[in-house]
Image (cartoon, rainbow, N blue to C red):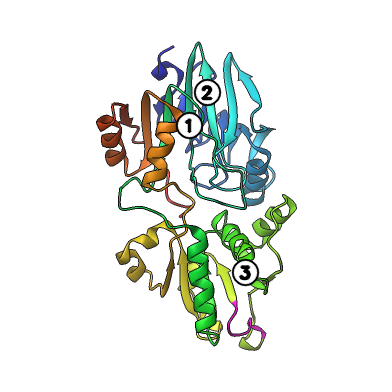
Amino acid sequence: MLPRDLLRSRPEGLYCPQGDFFIDPVRPVERALITHGHSDHARAGHGAVLATRETLDIMGLRYGPDFARATQAANFGETVELNGVRVTFKPAGHVLGSAQICVEADGTRIVASGDYKRSRDPTCAPLEPIPCDVFITEATFALPVFTHPDASHEIGQLLKSVRQFPERTHIVGAYTLGKAQRVIALLRQAGYNDVVYIHGALQKLCDYYESAGVPLGFIQPATVEDRGAAPPAGSIVVAPPAAIDDRWSRRFADPLACFASGWMRIRQRVRQRGVELPLIISDHADWGELTQTIRETGAGEVWVTHGREEALVRWCEINGIAAKPLHLAGYEDEAE
């Protein structure tokens, strides 16, 4: 089977004609396979959803229990057959429950990566490269300038700043699903055992991570009604990025704005957001991890989605790998 007959682009997203399903569709469809719980990939309103148990649970928390008419949980490594197409979910290393989706029929294997990373993350299973004929890769940070440092180094910079400025409250902007929990888990691994205060928007997902076996230690709500109830000076508060600039953040003792994102590599973005302490912690693969993963799959063809597509397509061509951009619309950088 030709790859384009197994998976093809449609306005709704990637579509498998034989299996009659979409992968991460951007609008409601009858049958959807979902790689992970971020809202640009996981939307409500589908007829049936196949995803990992964690992704289904996260969708339920975000959209309510009736986000789809029917759901089916996929276990990592287990193959499900849909109209003669074999579908297997394997870890993607992006957030809890995130998966690559391997689609096979008539001797052709295509792997849709969703979003992924290769760096260490105590909150989710690491990516497992899958040998395939065609690899569909994201390209969020697909420029050579993007080389993410070890996340433990960035957490070390945060803790150093806390020691240097004990009179200030460090507010770490981190996206609600995945990044916030990873920052907290990395703080614990670095030996930080004090209370970590969290914005109310993080509570349900942090509780879910704990219930899924991801220890986050002692966390406490940071939402305060008056300054007297605020966390003490020198505390670490984790909050959605928008909260850094909100009136909410001005309740704390001389707040020091931090932001955990791969985009903190770009100084202009740091200045635009008014960030005092940029933390280059990304849940997406950097340039080296993208090219490493492509090589490890052994794919003879690469399809590139949502991001800096042109540079990665050019790298593939230089290295003798057929490649093309898919130009899929509707996928943002919610996870960064």
Q: CA distance from mark 3 to mark 1?
A: 34 Å
Q: Foreground residue, 73 or 130?
A: 130
Q: Which residue is depicted at the point 33% across and 36% down?
A: 327
Q: Residues within 10 Å of mark 3 (few under 14, many from 20)?
A: many
Could you tell me residue 267's position as x and y percent?
Answer: 31, 66
Q: Main secondary structure of the magenta part?
A: loop
Q: Is residue 210 rendered to the left or right of residue 167?
A: right
The residue to which callout 3 is attached is 198
The residue to which callout 1 is attached is 112
- Residue 31's image quarter? top right
**Considering only vertical position in the picture, is 187 above or below 70?**
below
> Three-letter amino acid code at disc 2?
Val
Q: Which residues are magenta?
A: 229-235
Q: Residues within 10 Å of mark 2 (few under 14, many from 20)?
A: many
Q: Residues within 10 Å of mark 1 (few under 14, many from 20)?
A: many
Residue 243 seen in the current view: no
Q: Give whichever of discs 3 and 1 has the lower sequence position.
A: 1
**Considering only vertical position in the picture, is 26 above or below 133?**
below
Q: CA distance from mark 2 to mark 1?
A: 8 Å
Q: Give whichever of discs 2 and 1 has the lower sequence position.
A: 2
Tag 2 near tag 1, CB within 8 Å: yes
The residue to which callout 2 is attached is 103
Mark 3 residue element: strand
> Three-letter amino acid code at disc 1?
Ala
Could you tell me residue 93's position as x and y percent?
Answer: 55, 44
> Three-letter amino acid code at disc 3?
Ile
Q: Foreground residue, 275 or 320?
A: 320
Q: Give whichever of discs 2 and 3 has the lower sequence position.
A: 2
Q: Is residue 79 rendered to the left or right of residue 318?
A: right
